[in-house]
Image: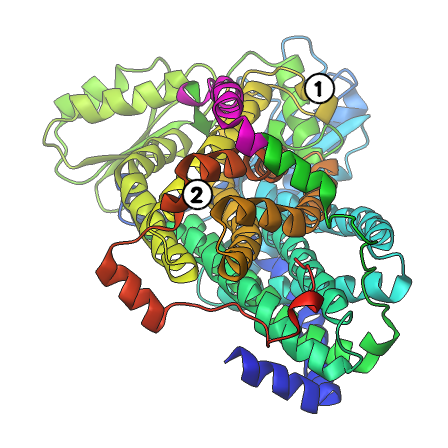
Amino acid sequence: MLTALARTATRRPLTVMLLWGLFLLLGFGLGTGVFARLSDNVPEVPGTESDSAARYLEEMDPAGSSVTGVVAGTPVADAGLRAEVERAVADVREVAGVAAVPDPYATPGMIAEDGHALIVPVTLEGGLDDDAEERTLDAAAERIREIDAPDVHVSGGPLLGLQMGERAQQDVKNAELISLPVVLALLLVVFGGLRSALLPLVVAVSGIAGAFLALFLFSEVTDISVYAIQVTTMLGLGLAVDYALLMLVRFREERRTTEDVVEAVHRTVAAAGRTVLFSGLTVAVSLTGLLVFPSVFLRSMGLAVAAVVVIDMLAALTLLPALLVRFGGRIPPAKTPRNGEEEGRFFARVARFAARRKVAVLAVTVPVLLVLALPVPGMSIAVGDARQLPADSEARQLQDTVAAHFPPGTGVSPVVVVARPGTDDATADRIRALGPGATTRELPDGGAVIEIRPPGEADGAEATALVERVREVRGDAPVEVTGTAARLVDFREMLEERAPWAALTVLAGIVVLLFAFTGSVLLPLRTVVTTLLSLAAALGVVVWVFQDGHLAGLLGAEGLGALSLTAPPLIVAIAFGLAMDYELFILARMREARLRSGDDQEAVVTGLSRSGRVVTCAALLLAVVFAAFMTGGFSPILQIGLGLTLAVLIDATVVRMLLVPATMALLGRHAWWAPRPLRRAHERFGVREEQPEVPREKVPSGV
């Protein structure tokens, strides 16, 4: 397959480039339409009680979603301001799709005790389609913002999701403006030439276009989260650069032994191309664990990110070879080491040190990683609110204003209890008694909605405890609980139930792929264990920073007492895949060296010396991309960005440079062991990453 791809790219490079050019136009044209389709309904899990109750309310409740306006910064008793507010309220009531707007001056609790702020809640009609709801929101919010006061903000409900989508779009643009020049500068340092440095960026831009197009296509059949844009774009950009870097370095190595550019491209695809292929497959398999969860968000993220990985892989295996055929003749070969000078001598020294001092290396690095992972058992997740957004966002300003002028709990989403027809009065009374100030409204079918405002935050410990308490006291009555806290409870239960199956799916797939790549049953197990160590260490730091609040201010964030429920599963899935990426880079060269020399110990040193530079550069470039996405100030993306940055750096340095040679030296020749039946199966069906034969003295050191 790889040979066919290489020959197609080299025979018709202009056709391949034209097809990818059309793909770019499609991605940046049609694909960017996904920004208008983003959803913040992350915690929804089909089939759960909270989802069932929400769907019931969509059908039966005449009242729809709501948004909130806040007016502050001046005495609300001022006659002029009161007249403006009353006119605005009257105008908003006339907006098509608005069900109710209470008069804040006549409604208890709408005016702050200090007299310097008031709230204007707007309830929409139920049953509005997306377009009608958006028109209603825009008209109502714009009219409220016209009130002449120092601070006027509108957000909440579906408007919060739209504002998050706008922030996501702006953050992606800013991150690309920051990361692409930095990546280009680093590539210039790595390759020493503009032409070589630009080729990975061409592949990276293709990855970004693919990310947009994949998300747009998935948005036709499922909801796409506001977090999907940043996550898929950062991963698509980073992996594209990684794969292009791997291929380019190998191409320059091959140019040492042949002046024929086409032949050099064929050898590159035959050797490094197999690593790219298996790397893409392992990253994609790592993300299949997300498909085990019934959450629409996790499934859509798994599919979208896996699609982007495949697009990056195909770009590296088709577009890059075509570009090399056209422009590779002007790319100079890699420098030949001087007589007696060892290729990659720094990494060779590190590998020899780790192999000689294997017990000491393990005794130091493993405890350090375990210490960094200590906060993980105390990790908590939450849906989050506007505090996740930067301080200059309208949603955050509204929440801060309400918190400054109104009692705690004002505006907090209630725990919504749906008492379907047939619920006895005694059960309803017991539920209402669980919270002071519980309100009840009747539904057209004879059911009722009981809303209980919890103390603290909408998804805090008190709110989730209230959900559990309602579910305890309802008995066998046809009562269901929904709302923010109930969705969080159901999401946590879903994670606990499905996480073991997701882990088993991923580990089984990874073990099979690594066995097919190496022919060993011990190397996959060793790889999984060392990777989990680096992953736990990175996740522990994220908990310490964003949940506990240590040093969070340096990143423009704050400790929120819990991580966003989006962060842990995405960090684990993506970081695990990236770790497999670097593992394959190193194992490919170790196996090559072992097949040629037959020396297990020296193969470890040779493999690391010839891949260490690429792994280090790739990790640095990927870290730059992830760090650029941390400049937007959106807390979930900050958490994901920090977690992935640390996971990549820890894995590419501590794990791959120290733990890998130490554990390989500890295992010795047993590292490549497999039972005889499996060994025969691998000899028949396994993967070979061998370049065409060249004179032994001219065998190039490569990636």
* Residue kind at label 1, given as amino acid type: Gly
Please give the name of the residue rendered at 36% of the width and 50% of the height, measured from the top-left corner: 506
Mark drawn on residue 82:
none
Frontmost residue, 85 versus 126: 126
Q: Give the side of residue 424 with respect to residue 144, left or right.
A: left
The residue wearing badge 2 is: 527
Dot placed on the residue nearer the N-terminal end, 2 or 1: 2
At x 78%, y 67%, the residue is 199
Tell me the residue at 43%/34% (across/down): 666
The front one of 470 and 15 is 15
What predominant SS class does the magenta segment belong to?
A: helix
* Residue 332 seen from this side: yes
Above or below for 437 versus 163: above
Q: Position of residue 253 (x, y in %)?
A: 74, 65
Q: Position of residue 188 (x, y in %)?
A: 87, 54
Distance (Cα) linking label 2 and label 1: 35 Å
Segment colored magenta: 354-377
The residue most toward the left is 476
Quarter of the figure with residue 593? bottom right
Q: How many C-alpha atoms fall within 10 Å of the one at disc 2: few (<14), some, or many (≥20)? A: many
Query: Left or right of 696: which side holds 432?
Result: left
Question: Relative to 176, does residue 491 appear above or below in the rendering?
Answer: above
Which quadrant, please, contains the C terminus?
A: bottom right
Residue 180 located within the stretch drawn in magenta: no
Q: Is residue 70 above or below residue 420?
A: above
**Does the image show residue 127?**
no
Q: Secondary structure at mark 2?
A: helix
Q: Amino acid at mark 2?
A: Thr
Q: Is residue 180 left or right of residue 504?
A: right
